[in-house]
Image (spheres, rainbow, N blue to C red):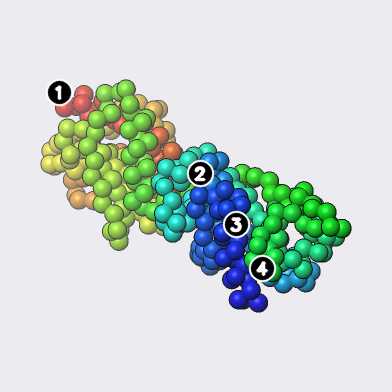
Amino acid sequence: MGKLESRMWSRVGVHLKRGLGCNVATQSFRFGNIGFDAVGYSSDDSIVHVVECKAGRKPVDIGHAFGQILAYRSVLSEKGYEFLTKFGDKVRMKTEDIVTATREGTLRVKFYVGLSDEACKNISLIEAMKKILPSVGIIRVKKDGGCRDYLLIKREKEYGLCKSETISVPIRRVHNHKQFLQAVERRLRDNLAGTPYSDFKTYTLVDKPYGDYEQFWFGRKQFHFEVLLRKRKFIELGIHLEGGRSDNLSIYRFFKKNRKAIEKSLGADAKIARWGKKHWRRVYEHLPRTDLTDEQVERVADKMAKHIKVLQPMVESWESK
């Protein structure tokens, strides 16, 4: 059975390009602990084509083929961006195609089952499966390896049962620390465009045991804003005062004097406190540590933009005195 199915994968992979219009395709694609029998991508309509093949003809083989589609769909929904990126690396897919395919936070996908000629004779079971999963198409694989997009019913070609409908699978992109900080910086620049605070300098440090961070500053680096990713604990954002002792304590007292205005603008979660070295201070807040998704990028960048708009004018007011 293994050799028969591997031969089916190969033939279906060819069919994805020649018969279904995919620009790129591959077979036996491994992602995590799941093997995808055949995957293709069509850049003309930004559709991912996914095929599960079964060489057996028994009802259980047909049922398993359709059932595996549900597992594929779950994987794409949970890690669709990572899936497409890895697939793109394997087939040398263009970066702009990956961006286009995931732009709306969904993947447009067509699912198919590749079944043998003998299995395709069980019309009643296939009809029952199609009632449960109507969007799943069927590719009939002949003994000679030829692929067909129709079934034979009383010697008549039946295309309807084989048709696959495009579905939109919502996807979640989960960033690693470096990707997350880069994405936060991009959105932060967008948020601050057109304000006096759009031109900031940055410094990023990742792969540290205590946490990874990116700093943003205007003028003196010692007074910088920072997004700090504490591993498995929390995300901290705010301004760090890491200059000389007298300056740190002076601006700290200035912030304390304006505590009510800060809390009114940033909310009660914003704290003014000591941290790190004896004379270091900060105004900060903690966010719960969850998956580093695009939604979390927006949340952190939007909050950081608010911190900058509220606190940087205070820093400049203090400096002018």
Q: Residue drawn 32% across and 33% down?
A: 189
Number of marks present in the image shown: 4
Q: Residue furthest right?
A: 154
Residues at badges 3 and 2 in contact (C-beta under 8 Å)?
A: no
Between 241 and 30, which is closer to the camera in this rendering? 30
Mark 2 vs 1: CB contact within 8 A: no
Q: Nearer the viewer, mark 4 or mark 2?
A: 4
* Sooner in the amino-acid sequence: mark 2 or mark 1: 2
Which kind of residue does numbered mark 3 sit on?
Answer: His
Relative depth, front residue between 200 and 97: 97
Give the foreground label among 3 and 2.
3
Q: Residue at x 66, y 56 (%)?
A: 112
Instruction: Tell me the residue that label 3 is attached to.
Output: 15
- Vertical relation: 285 (above or below) 123: above
In the image, what residue type sits under mark 2? Ser
Q: What is the number of the mark on residue 43?
A: 2
Q: Badge 3 local density, few (<14 within 10 Å), some, or many (20+)?
A: many
CB within 8 Å, label 4 to label 1:
no
Helix, strand or loop status at disc 4: loop
Q: Earlier in the sequence, mark 4 or mark 3?
A: 3
> How far separated are the C-alphas under marks 3 and 2?
16 Å
Tell me which residue sits at (80%, 58%) in the image.
152
Mark 4 residue type: Asp
The reply to whether residue 219 is visible in this rendering is: yes
Q: CA distance from mark 3 to mark 1?
A: 74 Å
